[in-house]
Image: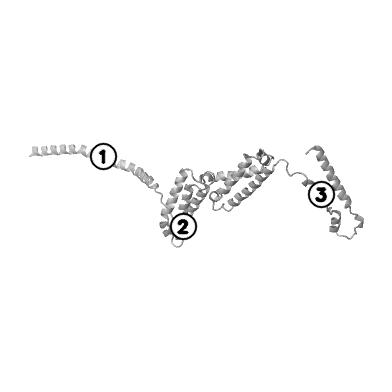
Amino acid sequence: MSFHTSCFLFIFLVAQFHTRVSCDVVDLNVLNVGDSPAAVHAAVFKPALGWSSSLSLLLSSFPEDLEISEYCSDLLHIFGQRYVSYVNCLVPAARPVKVCQNCFSSYGSLIDIYRNISDEVGPGNVSCSISLLHSDRLMVVYLLYHNLEDLWTKSGCEHCVTEGFLALTNDTLYFMTILNQTHSCFEKYHQGNHSELCTNCKDTYRQLNELFSRMEKNLTLCIDIEDAINSTRKMWSKTFNCSLPREETVPVIAVSSFMLFLPIIFYLSSFLHSEQKKRKLIHPKRAKSYTSLMNIQDKQN
């Protein structure tokens, strides 16, 4: 907006204000002494009837934003819709955590529209990156998107979702299947004696833990799987008071026991060996003494 236009707008507003105030001057002398303060306030500060409408009419004659095109405005509207859709999905999926398996589709849609804003060029070679993302200090659209992107990255959801946000990975689907079987077993035997639950659900629970360990080594875990295994383990150990001996501890115990008894075996074998040598050394001496004794007796006879 040029300097002359700004001056014209300022003069016009001042003139409108002076005209409206002049037409609505209130003679305070006509007010009675006994009138209430509310009446005096209403009389003095009563706004002009046409003032707000004149201002709205004047402002409506100027474009809302000369820097944004209709194409960019449409993209901004779509971004807002998809942003709200994704957030509305995240909140119910916060506990228990299912942000990856429930909301990957809406996040993929949000990425698509943000890429259109930041990278694509519309009709008439129009780019919306500057006008929507970097035109002001606050950069609302940019910050909103990257906050959700950071949430997606921290959740590790890319490990559980296929490329293109089309579906969950096979490993994730298989884990969810075993998880559902384990919880179904818990549900079946949770009433009454928990020892029956520990016995009947042991194999399924062990299979779930082994699958989790393999996925952890293969770096195919996301926050949904981590939260699911943590809650299941808590139910198994604290709620149902079950235990599952880990098979890898058996070799450790065996080796530790062998190392513990190794010094005892060594000293015992050393002791036996030394005793055997003593016997071998003493035996000839005894034999010689016996022969000498026999010779002496023969001479005496």
The span from disc 1 to disc 2 (Cα, nearest Å) is: 63 Å
Q: Is 260 drawn above or below residue 192 in the view shown? A: above
Picture quarter with the C terminus = top left
Q: Nearer the viewer, residue 214 or 50?
A: 50
Q: Return the mark for residue 52.
A: none
- Find the residue positioned furthest to the front: 124
Q: Return the mark for residue 273.
A: 1
Residue type at the position of mark 1? His
Whether residues under marks 3 and 2 lie with C-beta atoms below 8 angstroms apart, the answer is no
218 to the left or right of 254: right
Query: Of helix, strand and loop, which one carries label 1?
Result: helix
Q: Dot 1, how many residues are within 10 Å of its Cα: few (below 14), some (14-19), or many (20+)?
A: few
At x 42%, y 54%, the residue is: 202
- Find the residue positioned furthest to the bottom: 192
Query: Of helix, strand and loop, which one carries label 2?
Result: helix
Q: Is 232 drawn above or below residue 131 in the view shown? A: below
Residue type at the position of mark 2? Ser
Pointer 2: what residue?
A: 184
Going from N to C along the chain, the mark reached first, 3 or 2, is 3
Which mark is nearer the camera, 1 or 3? Answer: 3
Which mark is nearer the camera, 3 or 2? Answer: 3
Q: Dot 3, how many residues are within 10 Å of its Cα: few (below 14), some (14-19), or many (20+)?
A: few
Q: Is 58 drawn above or below residue 291 in the view shown? A: below
Picture quarter with the N terminus = top right
Going from N to C along the chain, the mark reached first, 1 or 3, is 3
Pointer 3: what residue?
A: 54
Residue 156 seen in this snapshot: no
Whether residues under marks 1 and 2 lie with C-beta atoms below 8 angstroms apart, the answer is no
Residue type at the position of mark 3? Ser
At x 39%, y 47%, the residue is: 249
Location of residue 286 by image quarter: top left
Image position, residue 61 (x, y; %) = 78, 45
